[in-house]
Image (cartoon, rainbow, N blue to C red):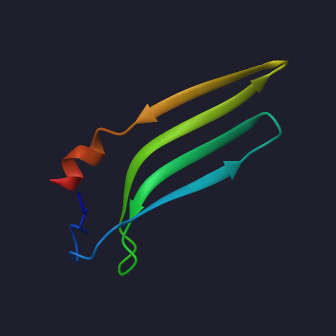
Amino acid sequence: MTRSCPRCFTRLEYRMEIEIGDGSRRVVRYYYRCPRCGYRIPDSEIIVKKNGSKVLLQLSEYVRRQAAMH
């Protein structure tokens, strides 16, 4: 299924970005982005935390994505 930008109806690109905080935390974000106007629709976010020898993952999926895509 092809997604279109709600602003300009251009085909959206699916992208990922990684935010590197201190040595114990990273955030990975997935989102749709319009190459023409820059509009972004968040898709999901993964937070990776290091706690000693353990690695903790936290996944957030966005409900706003469903509303924005329709």
Q: Residue furthest front?
A: 1
For the point 43% across and 55% down, the residue is: 31
Residue 54 picture location, percent across and down: 77, 18
Q: Is residue 38 above or below residue 41?
A: below
Q: Is residue 45 left or right of residue 2?
A: right
For the point 66% across and 33% down, the residue is: 48
Q: How many marks?
A: 0
For the point 33% across and 68% down, the residue is: 12
Q: Quadrant of residue 16?
A: bottom right
Q: Is residue 7 above or below residue 62?
A: below
Residue 3 picture location, percent across and down: 25, 62
Q: Is residue 21 above or below residue 37?
A: above
Quadrant that contains the N terminus:
bottom left
Q: Residue furthest bottom?
A: 36
For the point 14% across and 53% down, the residue is: 70
Q: Is residue 70 above or below residue 2?
A: above
Residue 38 picture location, percent across and down: 40, 73
Q: Quadrant of residue 33?
A: bottom left
Q: Quadrant of residue 9?
A: bottom left
Residue 53 picture location, percent across and down: 84, 18
